[in-house]
């Protein structure tokens, strides 16, 4: 009997069904049938409603709020597919939770990002596809192949489609030293200058801007980061840029966590517009916010992984 390549199947967890649906439309793949529920005590229950024996399974699940529930659901799904004799299980995690706990900042700190990577690997994942990891060294925490995609192409497309857009009137700003590489990549692709905010963190979710490195005077500043959480750091950064003579401030981030009072805080700030992507779902956002769709980028990356084609070409 001749060998045939395993069939590809695409499943979705409960964290971001809309993004999964858009990806399935782009890839022309029917979403796999699976029942996700919880027992009365909160335990996750998974039932795969179709065969996956000998198939290459791709499952998408962001580990966003509620982080622990979504993470546990992902682990149970991986285990279920492996026990159902799937040929391989590739996990798509658009937003990788716990990524900010990637090192020991103080004595006796856990490295939780490493713990989560161990859990995903031990559950049986064969490959991970994620997007704009908070710290690139997290790629080394996995002992399985990992593709860390980049979101900057969708932001570039947004700005290039703006009427009367002129790159000479803009400057890309990194909100801290750690994000310089990410911001420089966007600045180089769009042929813009780069500025850096020098800030310090006296405690978690609190940032103080010490200095602005670079010329932002009379320019529209694009604050480019990977995560917007409470919004406090971003608001402080925008005020510092305004104080240095920047005209308008546009905040861009891949992952809009927007916890607590972040939405109101950003809406009432000096920030003119906030651009985020749909790695994390939000029911309703004010007009100040624009959500950019990553389904085509993620879908194309998945298809390329499946066909053993280059993924990096998507960002050249």
Image (cartoon, rainbow, N blue to C red):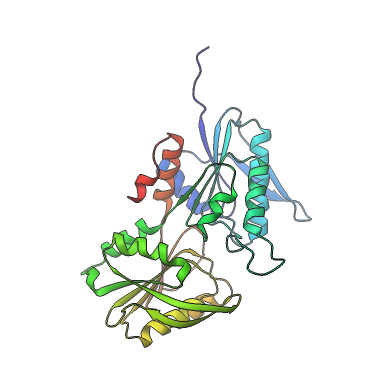
Question: Which residue shows up at 41% across the image and 84% down it?
Answer: 240
Q: Can you give x and y, in whole percent of width and height, for residue 102 in the image?
A: 60, 60
**Image quarter of residue 181:** bottom left
| Farthest-out residue, front | 107
**Image quarter of residue 86:** top right
Horizontal arrangement in the rendering, residue 24 relative to residue 80 (left or right): left
Can the viewer see residue 291 in this picture? no
Depth check: give the residue in front, 165 or 291.
165
176 vs 212: above or below = above
Question: Which residue shows up at 65% across the image and 39% down it?
Answer: 124
Q: Can you give x and y, in whole percent of width and height, for residue 315 in the image?
A: 35, 51
| Farthest-out residue, top | 1
Horizontal arrangement in the rendering, residue 217 relative to residue 76 (left or right): left
Can the viewer see residue 84 in this picture? yes
237 vs 41: above or below = below
| Farthest-out residue, bottom | 243
22 vs 204: above or below = above
Question: Which residue shows up at 71% across the image and 47% down it?
Answer: 45
Depth check: give the residue in front, 52 or 180.
180
Q: Can you give x and y, in whole percent of width and height, for residue 259 in the image?
A: 57, 71
Q: How many badges with numbers are in the image? A: 0
Horizontal arrangement in the rendering, residue 306 relative to residue 222 (left or right): right
Question: Which residue shows up at 53% across the image and 76% down it?
Answer: 262
Q: Can you give x and y, in whole percent of width and height, for residue 286 in the image?
A: 44, 73
């Amino acid at each position: 009997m001749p060998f045939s390549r395993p069939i590809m199947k695409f499943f979705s967890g409960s964290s971001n069904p809309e993004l999964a649906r858009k990806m399935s439309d782009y890839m022309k793949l029917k979403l796999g049938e699976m029942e996700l529920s919880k027992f009365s005590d909160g335990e996750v229950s998974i039932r795969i409603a179709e065969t996956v024996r000998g198939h290459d399974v791709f499952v998408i699940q962001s580990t966003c709020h509620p982080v622990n529930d979504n993470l546990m659901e992902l682990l149970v799904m991986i285990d279920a597919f492996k026990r159902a004799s799937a040929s391989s299980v590739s996990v798509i995690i658009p937003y990788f939770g716990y990524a900010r706990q990637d090192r020991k900042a103080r004595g006796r700190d856990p490295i939780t990002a490493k713990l989560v990577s161990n859990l995903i690997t031990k559950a049986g994942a064969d490959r991970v596809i994620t997007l704009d990891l908070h710290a690139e060294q997290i790629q080394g925490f996995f002992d399985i192949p990992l593709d860390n995609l980049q979101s900057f192409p969708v932001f570039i497309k947004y700005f290039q489609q703006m009427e009367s857009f002129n790159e000479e009137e803009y400057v890309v700003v990194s909100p801290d030293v750690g994000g310089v590489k990410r911001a420089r990549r966007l600045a180089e692709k769009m042929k813009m200058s780069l500025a850096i905010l020098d800030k310090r963190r006296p405690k978690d979710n609190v940032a103080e801007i010490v200095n602005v490195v670079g010329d932002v005077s009379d320019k529209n500043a694009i604050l480019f980061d990977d995560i917007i959480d409470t919004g406090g750091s971003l608001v402080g950064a925008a005020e510092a840029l305004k104080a240095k003579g920047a005209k308008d401030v546009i905040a861009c981030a891949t992952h809009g966590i927007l916890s607590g009072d972040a939405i109101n805080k950003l809406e009432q700030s000096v920030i003119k517009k906030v651009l985020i992507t749909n790695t994390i779902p939000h029911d309703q956002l004010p007009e100040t916010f624009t959500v950019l769709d990553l389904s085509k980028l993620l879908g194309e990356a998945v298809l390329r992984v499946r066909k053993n084609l280059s993924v990096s070409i998507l960002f050249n």
